[in-house]
Image: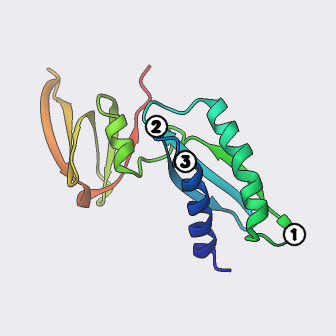
Amino acid sequence: MANEQVITAIRELAEGLLANDPDNFLVEIRIKPTNNVKLFIDGDKGVPVERLVAFNRAMYPLLEGSGLFPDNDFSLEVSSPGLDEPLKLHRQYLKNIGRKVEVTFLDASVKEGTLLAVTDDLITIEELIGKKKEKKQTDIHFTEIKHIKVCIVF
């Protein structure tokens, strides 16, 4: 079975499990050539480790019974996306309003600012410009963005 078909089948299983859990959602599925299946789950208010463990325990038998991996030759990891992972879903952008983000544009240029707003088409960030750190709001269309990461602020 082609990798995309396997990912689609796993997505259906995972979303079925998450259907009764409206605060959490599937972000991404990755499968390594060694059949290491990695599911990234996020939540509107974060995802506690206990929830990830419970999801893993519920998902594993579904994968075993699915027939997607001959002889059940697979491993399963469930985690939340780390801070080093770019935001992928609109829902992730919404949950990070108010946080500092780094926007990498298609031309590889970068801007940092506080995420103020998100629409279907664009984001608005507040940048601090110049030595006086004057505030400037900038609208950035999703079509201009390569990726966005949340900045770690100490």
29 or 23, nearer to the observer? 23
Write the residue at 34% across / 40% down.
Answer: 102
- Is 98 left, or right, of 14 in this rendering? left
Q: Position of residue 45 (x, y in %)?
A: 45, 30
How many numbered circles does the render carry? Answer: 3
User: Circle 3 — which element?
Assistant: helix
Q: Alpha-carbon neighbours of circle 1 within 10 Å: few (<14), some, or many (≥20)?
A: few
Q: Position of residue 126 (x, y in %)?
A: 19, 32
128 in relation to 41, above or below: above
Which of the two discs, 2 and 1, labels the residue nearer the N terminus? 2
128 or 42, nearer to the observer? 42
Q: CA distance from mark 1 to mark 3?
A: 26 Å
Q: CA distance from mark 2 to mark 1?
A: 34 Å
Three-letter code for the amino acid on which mark 3 is drawn? Leu
- Disc sitting over residue 13 in the figure: none
12 or 53, nearer to the observer? 12
Q: Determine the image quadrant of residue 6.
A: bottom right
Residue reaching furthest bottom? 1
Residue at which label 1 appears: 71
- Disc sitting over residue 18 in the figure: 3
Residue at which label 2 appears: 23
Cβ atoms at labels 2 and 3 below 8 Å apart: no
Three-letter code for the amino acid on which mark 1 is drawn? Asp
User: Circle 2 — which element?
Assistant: loop
Q: Position of residue 65 (x, y in %)?
A: 77, 63
Depth check, mark 1 against mark 3: the one in front is 3
User: Circle 1 — which element?
Assistant: helix
57 or 87, nearer to the observer? 57
- The N terminus is located in which quarter? bottom right
Three-letter code for the amino acid on which mark 2 is drawn? Asp
Q: Alpha-carbon neighbours of circle 2 within 10 Å: few (<14), some, or many (≥20)?
A: few
- The C terminus is located in which quarter? top left
